[in-house]
Structures are given as C-alpha cells and as structure tokens.
Image (cartoon, rainbow, N blue to C red):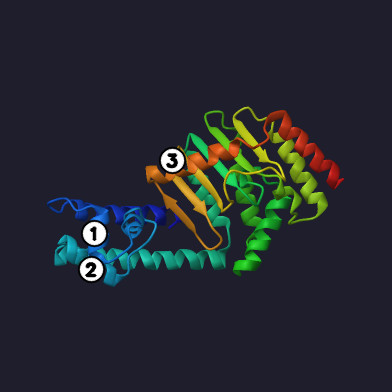
Amino acid sequence: MTASNLSDRRIEYGDRLKTHRVAVTPRLTGKALAERLGWRAAKVSLIEGGKQLPTEPELGAWAEVVGITADDLAALLQELRAIRLDDARWKARLRTGGHESAQRSFAEMEAAAATIVNFEPALVPGPLQTPGYARAMFASMAALKDAGDDLDAAVAARMQRQNVLYDETKTIEILFFEASLRNSIASDAVMAAQADRLLAATQNPNLRLGIIPVGVQVPYVLLHGFWLFDDELLIAEMLHTEVTTRDPEDVRLYRRYLADMWEVAAEGEAARTLLQRVLGDLA
C-alpha cells in the first residue's frame, strides 16, 4: 500500500461516517454532532475529511448519536483497525526501507495530473533537484528518521520523476525560497550545480518557476511545503507525516496562500538574475 492509497482509504472511511450522519432525520450537521459529543466543532470535519481517525470509543459514541446499527458499527470498527494497521506498516516501511517507495507514489500522482503545483519554504523542490542535492537531502532525513540505506534507489527514483517537467501536456508551478540555496545542506560545489540546474529550468516553457528572495516581506508565516494536483488533491508535508485532503475549502485556502506568495516572488529574468548572484557567491 502506498501513502496515496492509505490516504484515499482514510478519505473513504470519513465519507462513510459522514453518510451515516447526514442520513439522520432531521439532518444532523457536523457542528450539532460535535456539540452532542462534547467535541470541538473542527473534529468532526477532520474525521469526515480523512485527516484524523477516531478512537474506538469515539466511534462508538458517534454510532450511538447517529443511530448506526450494530452490524454497521462492527464493520466500521473492523475497517478502522485495518487502516491503523496499514498506517503502522507504512510508517515502519518508511523507517526501514527509506524514501524510494514515497518517490514512486508521488510519480504515480504526477503522471495522472494535468496541473501540478509544488511549494517549498525550506528546500529546493524535488522536481528540480540535482542528484547531489537529492542525495544530501535524503541522507539528512534518513539520519533524522533512522531510515534504511536506500540512497541510490531514492535518488534514482527522484531523477526519474523529473521527466514530468518535459511533458508538454502538463502545467507545472514550482515556488520556493532563495534561502533554500543559502542554507546549504551540501558542499558549495553541490549547491552551485543545483543553482545552475535551476537557472536552466527557467527556460522550460511549461514550468512556472518562482523564487522568493531573501529579505523580502512575505504575506504569511512559513509553515510547511505542499503539493496540489489538478486543484483537487492537496498533500501537505510535515516532518513526521503527510496530510492528504480533497476538501474544496482546504484547496481554496492553500491556493489563496500560494497566490499571495507568488506576488513577492521573482520570475523570469528576475529569477535568473537572482540565481546568477547565488552562483557568484558560491564560486
């Protein structure tokens, strides 16, 4: 099971719970359900959106309020336990097998999407990484997470993913910060090669590439990187996990965040000038 499969399974589970809630007559709102359960209002939304799993006691309380039958509750409990088991297996696989499987999972989503968006506040985005930069990045995260030694396979999988940049049927937006090149995770030679790779990427006709300069005032606080596929699937990457949602409100929120960040980004000739300055400093 891949991360995307697991996320889809969580979403489907949340949809099943929502179906039971809206079947109540008169219709029971998420807010009303939260009040009856003594929860904060957002918790119902998180569970129904697949971003949070209920505990077994919470599922039992939910079932009692909305009138889920004993047979349906048993099936929901069985599925809940299966999702938690797969979740544990997935995290164990990442710890022992490293990052290659995650790269292949993202490649599947990129292949299926017509529009791909990637925002990164702290590193050079994966689709534009050189092998040297990717290796340094994977090595640092493997050390932190005590992951397996699959650097060669992970780097190869990431490089294979970059073929998507040359697919003229796709529209790609990548936005990141100059600080990603200034806060080096590798040698100056590796960072210079990375800046040169980015300079070449500014000429890609189906890629919108933006770099937010050091020192510019940004409209919002920087939190974490994220991906958008076809403005339907949102994946937010955090240190310990990733959150996946198809909730239109979530997608709109991130799109607004992204649009305002683009306002302060350097593009085109301004981005090339910025990269030339970085290269000069690294020389």
- Residue 118, given in percent of the width and then of the height, sits at 56, 43
**Residue type marked 2:** Ala
Q: Is residue 180 above or below residue 200?
A: below
In the rendered image, the residue lying farthest to the bottom is: 57
**Which residue is pictured at 76% across the width and 37% down the height?**
274
Whether the residues at callouts 2 and 1 have beta carbons within 8 Å, the answer is no
Q: Quadrant of residue 142?
A: bottom right
Circle 3 crowding by C-alpha within 10 Å: few under 14, some 14–19, many from 20: few
- Residue 250, given in percent of the width and then of the height, sits at 42, 46
- Write down the residue under mark 3: 252
**Residue type marked 1:** Leu
- Write down the residue under mark 1: 33
In the rendered image, the residue lying farthest to the left is: 25
Closer to the camera in the image, 163 or 44: 44
Residue 92 in sight here: yes
Labelled disc at residue 193: none
* Secondary structure found at label 1: helix
- Write down the residue under mark 2: 61
- Residue 15, given in percent of the width and then of the height, sits at 28, 52
**Which residue is pictured at 71% across the width and 49% down the height?**
179
Circle 2 crowding by C-alpha within 10 Å: few under 14, some 14–19, many from 20: some
Sequence-first disc among 3 and 2: 2
Report the Cα–Cα distance between label 3 and label 2.
Answer: 32 Å
In the figure, is residue 24 to the left or right of 132? left
**Which residue is pictured at 23% across the width and 57% down the height?**
32
